[in-house]
Image (tube, rainbow, N blue to C red):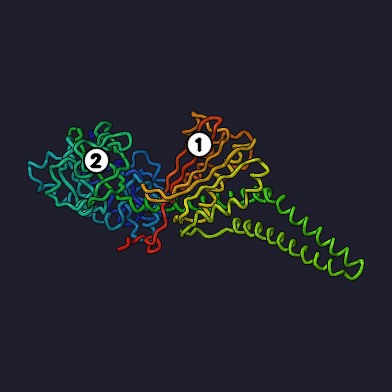
Amino acid sequence: MPFQDESASHTFKIAIVGGGRRCLSFLQLMELKKLNRLHVDIAGIADVHTRAVGFEYARKKGIFTTARYRDLFDIPGLELILNLTGNIEFSHELNKATPEDLPVLNHIASRLFQEIVQDVFTSTQQIARQKEALSLNHSFIQALAEVTVVGAMVIDTHYKVVWINESALKKIGLRKDEVLGRYCFQISHNAITPCDSPESPCPMKETLKTGQSAHAIHEHIHHDKERYCDVSTFPIFNDKGQIVQVLEVVRDITAEMNDRLDHKTRAIKNDLARLVHEDKIISLGKMVASVAHEINNPIGSIINFNKLILKIIEQGPPTHRELEDFKRYLHLTVREAQRCGKIVSNLLSFSRQQQMETKKIDLTEMFQRIVALTQHKMMLSNIKLILDFEPIPLEVLGDYTQIQQCFTNFVFNAMEAMPRGGELTIKAGINEMPPGVWVTVTDTGVGIPNENMDKIFEPFFSTKTEVSGVGLGLAMVYGIIKAHNGHISVESELNKGTTFRIILPAHTNASDAGGKKDK
């Protein structure tokens, strides 16, 4: 049952949640003939108590009724929901469930709105002749905007602000006289032209064009800070059905956006930690295969020496000369066992999963560990290793596990790029601008084609035709280096080799002091 003037070109369509006595009185009030010019259409009533007086009254009048308030969301062109339940807990549920572009007036604001409608009725006869030309639809929306907690302002067709509520003034930190008469884009965006672009479409422009409500997400300037705002616009018509002004309702969603961003950031960090650990397992498998032969040699020597000693003892008491040989054999077995122990210790250190921790890292010591675990495979692959580090402490600030994984990945990639052997050169030194430590990893391998240079840091991009366990890949390495405020670049020449250059922030005493500068 629409409460509308059929000659009007636009009707403000609302729905009510709560079908009690307050709903009944509101429906009866809206039926009064003197209020028909408000062009308000009661499009639906929702209440779980289907025998409530207002609910039954609406049903008899032919208004859409339902026990499920979510059914109201499907009403075409619905522009507002009035919550007349008076239940605070339900109000929170309703606000969360309602689509973002559909305003909801809580029970307090709805009561004020009802009183405003009553006042409109009682004061209609006293309205001055010069104000009668204004649309009552405009008065309705303006009264509605005054009682809402979100920011609202009325803008003319030339984009100038003609009215603004207190909530909006508080948010932008300006006085009313500093806003009225100025362009809306000056107030919201601190701009000199309308805010209309593919990235930031102007909802007001859309409303002026279509005569319908519009919606967009904008970045506004509030107190010299950027805020994310949900902007909705609604047309205001005169008695001739022409758009004379636009109501703009602005809701600050910065906190909501930040919460979503924080949630996604935490998820990305968790995924990164998981991928680092998975890559360590893959790299560990490579290292185990690499050092297996190296461990077998000393173990074979230990077994042979022990068998020899056991055989001599079984033949009878050893001679003095044989005891001297035993001593020499045992020294050799101890040395070989220590060699095995060092290899196993390095493997355990590499495989140990630790919590993310930013601390001082000695790159010289780190590369010694990496080389100790890969040099045997380099020998078998006929790869010559050249280390050229400046003879000074090369210390950076970062997470040991992630940085070690990055450089291990560089070493393995270089080795795989030289299937027929070659030279692997690792250099490191102090970088002056920007201040930090630089590291270069150079191979004499197959190189990278020019058409792939712009893609090598993209996720899942690989030039390898076989599954060879590339682990993190250069995309993950790039992400880790950037997360440590570092820099990475690459130079390559096809069939001649590739050089990766990495710069990481240097560790300083100020780093230990939480980033405070030394006096």
Q: In this orientation, which residue lies closer to the viewer: 27 or 177?
A: 177
Quadrant assignment for the C terminus: bottom left
Q: Give how far across and how far down residue 326 sits, in percent.
A: 80, 66
**Looking at the picture, which amino acid does disc 1 mark?**
Ile
Looking at the image, the residue that sits furthest to the right is: 315
Which residue carries the number 2 mark? 39
Q: Residue sitting at 28 percent across and 58 percent down? A: 108
**Circle 2: residue type:** His
Residue 57 at x, y = what percent? 34, 50
| Mark with earlier residue (1, 2) | 2
Name the mark nearer the viewer: 1 or 2: 1
In the rendered view of the protein, which quadrant contains the N terminus? top left
Q: Is residue 272 above or below residue 135?
A: below
Q: Residue at x 77, y 59 (%)?
A: 302
Residue under pointer 1: 456
Residue sitting farthest toward the front: 321
269 or 403, which lies in front? Answer: 403
Q: Quadrant of residue 341?
A: bottom right
Q: In the rendered view, does 42 fall on the left or right side of 165? A: right
CA distance for labels 1 and 2: 62 Å
For the question of whether residue 41 can be seen, the reply is no
Q: Secondary structure at mark 1?
A: loop
Q: Which one is nearer the viewer's eye here, 172 or 85?
A: 172
Q: Is residue 166 visible to us here?
A: yes
Q: Residues within 10 Å of mark 1 (few under 14, many from 20)?
A: some
Q: Residue at x 75, y 61 (%)?
A: 333
